[in-house]
Image (tube, helix red, strand yellow):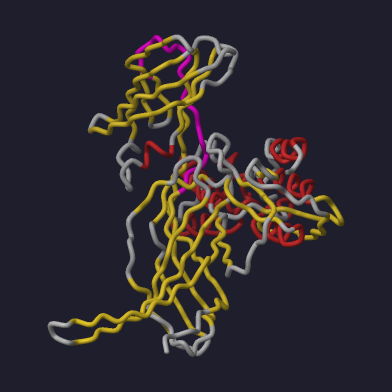
């Protein structure tokens, strides 16, 4: 079992978050960015559009000057700068965290602490359910995507990654164990792997008609895991098959599966799925390409609407939110139950109930010590939402004093492309 000090090392590492990406050649681009921002105020609509497109391509190199332009006296410049900053934030939301490594014969736990600091991902080394191999590793990479860096470390040290079983402390845990030989694909903050391929032959004989019906089906069982910093709140139950090509060049069609949405709770970091395809011929040893499209909803830029007078029923306003405490009951323990009324343009959402899972409610005493959330019930209506939430403290907690309602300023829906290469296929068939 890994030592408590080593476990704490990686736990604390995630509290000092480094920037995920640094502005590329920002100094060299400053004059160009300044000229493009001036063109946002051009009298020509076409010129304004072209300037916006060029600034969008400059990405993080333009952030600092766009932030200043968002306070411009010119309403056109102000509006377009804010739109570009929002797009930049959304793009970063869906991008992999990047890390720089130049480590030789460094302990795996120390390397993971460095990756955690740079990426903003909570990484624990070992827990009560699994030991950790603190073997020396060599990692040299520049701006490497998070998952590729962690997987390389795990292959060298004999460890693997899984979500933390304790939902009170969600995150990713690195424990001893073989990584397996799964086909793996990376897409932004998501890592997907194929756990098994299932080929089924069956025959049904109908005695009434004395007819035999033979069927052949094929299915991949997949698992997707994502970075701890990535706030995924909803996902399609199954990905869509875009392309499947065998080693013999045959193109196979995907077969329809469930297409509805599922909610990802705040502690969820991993889900299992399956995709069905037209059965490949047993002469095909592998799929040269399996291309999937998986639709997700994620949130970012979390803000907090605070109420520090819990006995007041007056509503508080922020952004497009209106929050009011309709009732509060405090009992020994200490325990507290709050009934809230929330009005927001975001309450009605697709999928249903998404709004209630993308937000967080936190309760603190006068010294800033948190209460533990026990449960929450939600009711949506034309007037907004009614939320009843209960909290419990311990012997150190004083009376409840401050409520924080955390909500995202960005809700983004995108389809990730997940591409597997050279996927081995089962070759057997009945005699």
Which quarter of the figure is the C terminus placed in? bottom left
Residue 183 falls in image quadrant = bottom right
340 over 69 or under it: above or below = above
> Horizontal and vertical percent for residue 79?
46, 43
Residue, far right: 105
In the foreground, 143 or 364: 364
> Horizontal and vertical percent for residue 268?
49, 45
Task: Please name the residue shown 63% across and 65% down the image.
Answer: 180
In the foreground, 91 or 145: 145
251 over 113 or under it: above or below = below
In the foreground, 193 or 31: 193
In the foreground, 134 or 28: 134
Asked if residue 178 lies left or right of residue 277, the reply is right
Residue 313 in magenta stretch: yes
Q: How many marks?
A: 0
59 over 242 or under it: above or below = above
One can see residue 248 in this view = yes
> Horizontal and vertical percent for residue 402?
49, 16
Residue, far left: 208
Task: Please name the residue shown 39% across and 24% down the image.
Answer: 389
Start-end of magenta stretch: 298-315
Which quarter of the figure is the N terminus placed in? top right
Task: Please name the residue shown 67% across and 57% down the image.
Answer: 177
Asked if residue 310 lies left or right of residue 105, the reply is left
Task: Please name the residue shown 36% across and 17% down the image.
Answer: 325
């Amino acid at each position: 079992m890994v030592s408590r000090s080593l476990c704490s090392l990686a736990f604390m590492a995630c509290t000092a978050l480094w920037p995920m990406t640094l502005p590329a050649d920002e100094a060299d681009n400053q004059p160009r960015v300044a000229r493009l921002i001036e063109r946002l105020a051009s009298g020509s609509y076409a010129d304004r559009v072209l300037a916006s497109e060029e600034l969008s391509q400059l990405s993080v190199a333009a952030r600092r000057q766009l932030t200043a332009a968002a306070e411009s006296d010119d309403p056109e410049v102000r509006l377009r700068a804010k739109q570009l900053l929002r797009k930049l934030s959304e793009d970063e939301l869906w991008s992999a965290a990047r890390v720089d490594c130049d480590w030789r014969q460094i302990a795996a736990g120390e390397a993971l602490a460095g990756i955690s600091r740079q990426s903003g991902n909570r990484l624990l080394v070992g827990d009560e359910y699994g030991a950790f191999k603190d073997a020396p590793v060599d990692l040299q990479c520049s701006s490497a995507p998070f998952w590729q860096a962690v997987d390389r470390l795990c292959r060298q040290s004999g460890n693997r990654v899984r979500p933390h079983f304790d939902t009170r402390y969600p995150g990713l845990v690195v424990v001893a164990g073989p990584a397996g030989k799964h086909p793996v694909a990376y897409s932004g903050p998501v890592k997907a792997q194929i756990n098994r391929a299932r080929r089924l032959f069956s025959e049904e004989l109908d005695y009434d008609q004395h007819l035999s019906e033979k069927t052949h089906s094929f299915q991949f069982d997949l698992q997707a895991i994502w970075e701890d910093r990535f706030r995924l709140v909803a996902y399609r139950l199954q990905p869509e098959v875009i392309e499947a090509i065998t080693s013999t060049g045959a193109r196979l069609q995907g077969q329809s599966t469930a297409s509805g949405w599922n909610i990802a709770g705040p502690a969820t970091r991993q889900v299992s799925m399956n995709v069905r395809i037209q059965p490949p011929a047993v002469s095909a040893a592998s799929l040269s390409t399996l291309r999937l499209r998986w639709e997700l909803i994620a949130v970012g830029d979390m803000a907090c609407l605070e109420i520090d007078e819990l006995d007041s029923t007056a509503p508080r306003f922020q952004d497009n939110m209106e929050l009011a405490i309709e009732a509060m009951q405090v009992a020994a323990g200490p325990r507290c139950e709050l009934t809230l009324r929330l009005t927001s343009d975001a309450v009605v959402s697709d999928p249903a109930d998404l709004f209630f899972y993308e937000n967080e409610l936190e309760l603190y005493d006068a010294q800033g010590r948190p209460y533990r959330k026990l449960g929450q019930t939600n009711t949506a209506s034309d007037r907004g939402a009614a939320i009843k939430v209960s909290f419990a403290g311990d012997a150190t907690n004083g009376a409840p004093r401050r409520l924080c309602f955390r909500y995202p300023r960005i809700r983004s829906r995108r389809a990730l492309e997940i591409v597997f290469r050279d996927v081995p296929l089962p070759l057997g068939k009945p005699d």
